[in-house]
Image (tube, helix red, strand yellow):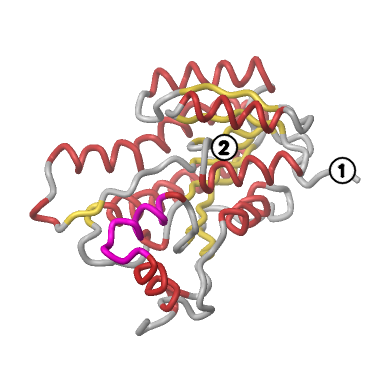
Amino acid sequence: MAGRLEGKRVVVTGAAQGIGLAIAEVFLGEGASLFLIDRDGDLLAAEAARLRATGGRVAHASADITDADAIERAVAVATSEIGRPNALVNNAGVNVFFEPLKLSDADWQRCFDINLKGAWNCSRAVLPGMIEDGGGVILNIASTHAFTIIPHTFPYPVAKHALLGMTKALGLEYAGQGVRVNALAPGYVRTQKAVEYWNSFPDPVAAEAATMTLHPGGRIATPEEIAKAALFMTSDECPFMNATCLTVDGGLSVLHHP
């Protein structure tokens, strides 16, 4: 039986670890051809080799998504390696958390360059080919920060709110050319970033337990659970889903008083 992503030629950014790597693993298992991008060239090469060893079609390039020229070159390599991309998962991102008046100009710029401009650089690089081919899918990995606010996490939620705006704008702009643009908003996910966050506290075990109690189900998501939602949104199973955001947070953002 054919996989759910047979015929999909997918670019995934931030693919060397965490949610991006989980997406690569799940997508490969469903028949996608993959082109993986990450700044960490050594880790990316090792994971790409591991995935190729399973028999899948996987190519990769180390690139900084904030560098538009580098991304253009990477997409050109992707086209030669796996064929012109007809799907993109903008997963790469970075947590930039400050009290507003303690934020430096450099950290403001870093937040928006990676979390917003980077997604635009990648989208701009693949859109002409998708339009010429009559369709494609762009999935932006957003966050519940895109519609809720946690104090002292400025300006990360500002960038993620803007990412949702870009999702909607591009989705409407290119719907007539067969391109769907959507966002996926995870809540807390058990990634290395989460572990590093807990480890920043004097008692990491207590910090992790406190995070769990915020959630109605008493746990947080695994990267694989987010990847499975991304699989659905990238597949042809939801052809009328466009310019919208799917929240996958276990009900956290609905809970009024955690």
Mark 2 packing: few (<14 Cα in 10 Å), some, or many (20+)? Answer: many
What amino acid does circle 1 point to? Ala
Q: Residue furthest bottom?
A: 257
What amino acid does circle 2 point to? Leu
Q: Position of residue 19 (x, y in %)?
A: 53, 48
Q: Residue furthest left?
A: 101
Which mark is drawn over residue 2? 1
Q: Which element carries disc 1, helix, strand or loop? A: loop
**In this rendering, is residue 153 above or below 14?**
below
Choose top left, top right, bottom left or bottom right for residue 20.
top right
Question: How many marks do you count on the picture?
Answer: 2
Mark 1 packing: few (<14 Cα in 10 Å), some, or many (20+)? Answer: few
Which mark is drawn over residue 88? 2
Q: Residue furthest right?
A: 1
The residue under the point 49% across, 58% down is 190
Magenta stretch: give its range: 193-204
Measure how far apart labels 1 and 2 are at the Cα level: 21 Å
Q: Position of residue 160 (x, y in %)?
A: 35, 52
Q: Position of residue 157 (x, y in %)?
A: 30, 57
- Give the side of residue 212 with respect to residue 203, left or right: right
The residue under the point 46% across, 31% down is 122
Choose top left, top right, bottom left or bottom right for residue 48.
top right
Q: Position of residue 113 (x, y in %)?
A: 30, 36
CB of mark 1 within 8 Å of CB of mark 2? Answer: no
The residue under the point 57% across, 59% down is 222
